[in-house]
Image (cartoon, rainbow, N blue to C red):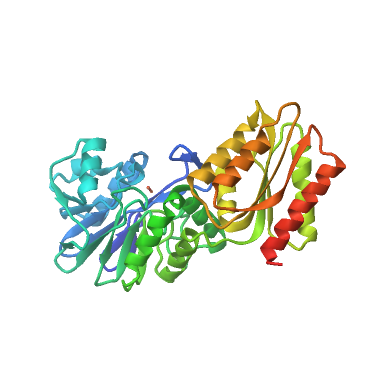
Amino acid sequence: MNTLSVKITEDLFYIGVNDRETHLFENLWPLDNGISYNSYILTGEKTALLDTVKISKVDGFLTKIKSILNGRKLDYLVIHHMEPDHSGSIKAVLDMHPEVKLVGNKKTGEFLKAFYGIVDGFIEVNEGASLDLGDKKLDFYMTPMVHWPESMVSYERSNKVLFSQDAFGGFGALNGPIFDDEINWDFYESETRRYYSNIVGKHSRQVQTAIKKLANLDIFMICPLHGPVWRSRPQKIVELYDRWSKFDTEEGVVIVYGSMYGNTSVMAEAIARVLAEEGIKNIKLFDVSKTHVSYIINEVWKYRGLILGSCTYNNGLFPPMSHLVNLIRMNTMKNHILGIFGSYSWSGGAVKALREFAEASEFEFIDTVVEAKCAPTDGDLDGCTKIAKEMASRLKGV
Ligand code: FEO
């Protein structure tokens, strides 16, 4: 028995790898729980490797390929996505199997040349094309911008398997469990939404297009490039991606504050307390200087209410709050109710910047805005109470 790979069907194997060493995905997003770079190999009449892994994991990956092929030649390497967490080992696979044909679309070919100088042995496929593997076929569907312009998926008809690349993936290494029926979903759900909101969410419109395009396929199993293989309930991850890409938020409030000496945090706490008194059960309170924006964005994606508070720094937003606001703006998030507050000591700036952000967003805006000079007065705290009450009332639709 080959213990390095996992059999999925008679001639389909999981040969992914786990990365628990890298601190930041894309050198941006924390990987506190690691990540898997999934790869699959089909061993029917023709052999086909479906994507590779990040170059830092190439040695173990090549060992798995060698073990599964057991002397057979590799006919095809299908490249669903060119981001280097999946394309990084293509050259190493070519070195080991110079006979292999690379399969991708026009943009895949452009990236292959630009990233790795590879031009030979490339087979171009387009929307609706099929790759004949003898006893089975792979049908290709283009899913541009989920996550890059060349992103595409393939569907293997005989086993009804969708190879979905980044779509339907998530953060979190696979620590033994590989399949959705083996994992603790309570843990993976948050990590999967964090992956969605941090990496794919900006392209939610294109995710909706892809979900609609694939809706008529009879999908028995989903094999993404990160996170668990969905063999028991593939519809569950499709439903979640559908909800997240529709900005289908739920009742709850995320309060984020930037505070140098505690005065703005006092207002945040006052708002949180009143929200609790008003019956809001899901309240997430973050110090933007302490919690990485990756985790904040994940919660903002989940809950409808958002309250941002910032001290003034050099006549503008506190820099970590500015970073968060830029990310929210970049992700073109929708379906939120927004409240703002802040503080200043001599010339303002933070609340003005938050107001500009609110006006440019598609969020519902809470009319009450509080701007404290130095430390909040009783009047300012009364204003915080008003923000909280108005937020609770709108969330509950009363
Ligand atoms: Fe997992 Fe867009 O790469």
Which residue appears at 46% of the width and 68% of the height?
236
Which residue appears at 70% of the width and 51% of the height?
367
Depth check: 147 or 355 in front? 355
Left or right of 47? Residue 82 is: right
Point out the image quarter for the C terminus. Answer: bottom right
Question: In the image, residue 71 lies at what x, y percent?
Answer: 17, 53
Question: In the image, residue 16 lies at what x, y percent?
Answer: 36, 53
**In this rendering, is residue 214 above or below 117?**
below
Depth check: 27 or 398 in front? 398
Point out the image quarter for the N terminus. Answer: bottom left
* Residue 172 at least partly seen: no
**In this rendering, is residue 208 above or below 92?**
below
Depth check: 212 or 111 in front? 212
Determine which quarter of the picture holds residue 376: top right
Which residue appears at 19% of the width and 40% of the height?
95
Q: How many marks?
A: 0
Left or right of 262? Residue 334 is: left
* Residue 355 at least partly seen: yes
Question: In the image, residue 128 lies at what x, y percent?
Answer: 21, 63
Question: In the image, residue 125 lies at what x, y percent?
Answer: 18, 55
Left or right of 82? Residue 256 is: right
Which residue appears at 77% of the width and 43% of the height?
267
Depth check: 361 or 245 in front? 361
Left or right of 302? Residue 78 is: left
